[in-house]
Amino acid sequence: MKYRPGTVNQSISYNSHSNRLYFISDESISSVPVSKLGKLKPSDVKATAFNGHREFEGLAFTSSGTPYLLLNRSAEIMKGSGIQ
């Protein structure tokens, strides 16, 4: 996780539907499988950096895995689909 995108971690979130832990920072989202914590391989880490000049503040998931992303500068909550 040393080279994940983003500079400052804004929040951490857990998706029980996919059993992944998410790290939200600036305009990026990284995730790792909880079952492999302590023995992660680079291929286990998923990371996406966005270029929308918006700051991500938090991420939450419903029990079915639907994500909701909280953004700063204009405050907004976005409902996602297809995130894993």
Image (tube, helix red, strand yellow):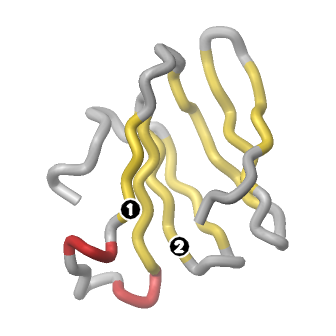
How far apart are the two marked residues, 1 and 2, measured between alpha carbons? 10 Å
Whether pointer 1 and pointer 2 mark residues with C-beta atoms closer than 8 Å, the reply is yes
The answer to whether 4 is drawn above or below residue 56 in the figure is below
The answer to whether 30 is drawn above or below residue 8 in the figure is below
Query: Which residue corresponds to the image point at 38% horizontal and 37% vertical from the top-left?
Result: 49
Q: Nearer the viewer, residue 24 or 47?
A: 47
Query: Which residue corresponds to the image point at 37% horizontal and 53% vertical from the top-left?
Result: 47
Q: Residue furthest front?
A: 82
Provide residue 81's location: percent of width, then percent of height. 74, 53
Q: Does label 1 or label 2 sit earlier along the sequence?
A: 2
Provide residue 82's location: percent of width, then percent of height. 68, 58
Quarter-of-image position of residue 76? top right
6 sits to left or right of 73: left
Provide residue 45's location: percent of width, then percent of height. 33, 67
Query: Helix, strand or loop at disc 1?
Result: strand
81 sits to left or right of 72: right
